[in-house]
Amino acid sequence: MATTSEDLRERRKNAADNCERWLSSRRLPAADRLRELAEAATADQVDVYGNGGEVAALEQEVAELLGKPAAVFLPTGIMAQQAVLRVYADRAGTSRVAVHGLAHLLVHELNALEEVHHLRIERMTSEPRQPRPDELAAIPGNLAAVTLELPLRDAGFVLPTWDELVVFSRSCAERGVPLHLDGARLWESTPYLGRSLAEIGALASTVYVSFYKILGGISGAALAGPEDMIAEVRRWQRRLGGNLFSMFPYAVSARNGLRTVLPLMDDLHERAVEVAMSLQSEGFRVFPEPPHTNSFRVYAPRAAESIERAAVERMERTRESLCGPWTAADVPGWSWVELVITPMTLDWQVDEIAKAFGELLPR
């Protein structure tokens, strides 16, 4: 017999399949997605093992955006970051890399850095904030690399200030350790930091970016940096099985995202701040306050199962999708959910969003 939580999950799935309006995201039917890709393609040539065509064009565009000499397209960000950190370790002759304890590298990748590459993880901190230079300095001995996740998703999409980022970068340089940016959501970080992608990229030796999140690509990632580093990463891409015979559909969707979504980052961040303020007037709390990016956490004074039931019932009644499943918060009787402001959100009025969320709280 299905439990209450299993029943709610099944009801949410069914309700989502029947939705006609979405606040954050929607999965297009496969045929529609393929037609969209066909219209977005600009290169006649199809890449062969990543050479030529849309893939080569994408790599050049990303290198220019991030202000780096070269870039390589890979099927996943997990592969991209494993490869670059392995190259750093082999070059430095040490397996030690400094990472935040809440980084995606540690939380969501089944301990791949240690299990696959035998890297030794040095945690700068596990606090829900960006690490400080003094916490890096407290790690003695040689390090192969230091990583920063911008923004730090599992801390609530938090960013350092620009000045803090500059100081942290300088501390790495003074120690002679390369800084690598986990920029899966770096596109969304420019409004808060107040700098271009190239200016942010200039503070690090290498930068990873993702295409399937806010840019709406099918999948895929890119790593940008010095030409010799990128050449070595390509060798690890091959070793790890990521050198697919052709990757042009992924590259087409990524380039389309760069053309159509990347220019909206200021608008999305501005709308995130507006929505966050409006939700607080309905009895919710948000973190960070105000949001650092287009994504933030929404906290509700209602138990997770109770508000999730209300959310599913609203989906069934209105055929509107507001957010993902609610999760129990650390404070008893409270729950939280991630809210991502996307181009679809711009079609909603701010007060309309607040009113819709307000229906999830008891009056």
Image (cartoon, grey):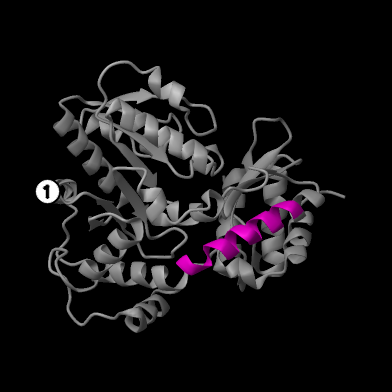
Q: Position of residue 226 (x, y in %)?
A: 21, 49
* Whether residue 341 is visible: no
Q: Main secondary structure of the magenta part?
A: helix
Whole-percent x, y for residue 13 in the image:
55, 59
Q: Residue at x 27, y 33 (%)?
A: 113
Q: Is residue 298 above or below residue 250?
A: above
| Residue at horizontal 30 percent and vertical 79 percent from the top | 41
Q: Which residue is mark 1?
A: 235
* Residue 1 as seen in the image, left or right of residue 202: right
Dividing the picture into quadrants, the one containing residue 109 is top left
Tell whether position 268 is magenta. Answer: yes
Say left or right for 120 vs 322. Answer: left
Depth check, front residue: 146 or 5: 146
Q: Give x and y (percent) for residue 149.
A: 42, 41
Q: Is residue 58 left or right of residue 131?
A: left
**Circle 1: element type:** helix
Residue 26 part of the magenta-drawn span: no
The residue lying at 45 percent from left, 34 percent from top is 167
Q: Is residue 249 visible?
A: yes
Q: Quadrant of residue 332?
A: top right
Seen from the viewer's position, the closer of residues 4 and 119 is: 119
In this picture, is 251 found above or below 131? below
Name the amino acid type tagged 1. Arg
Residue 84 percent location from the top left of the image: 23, 42
- Magenta region, residue range: 262-277
Disc 1 crowd, CA 10 A, few/some/many (<14, 14-19, 20+)? some
Image point 65% across, 35% down: which residue? 329
Up-down relation of residue 47 to residue 204 (above or below): below
Q: Is residue 50 left or right of residue 219?
A: left
Marker count (numbered)? 1
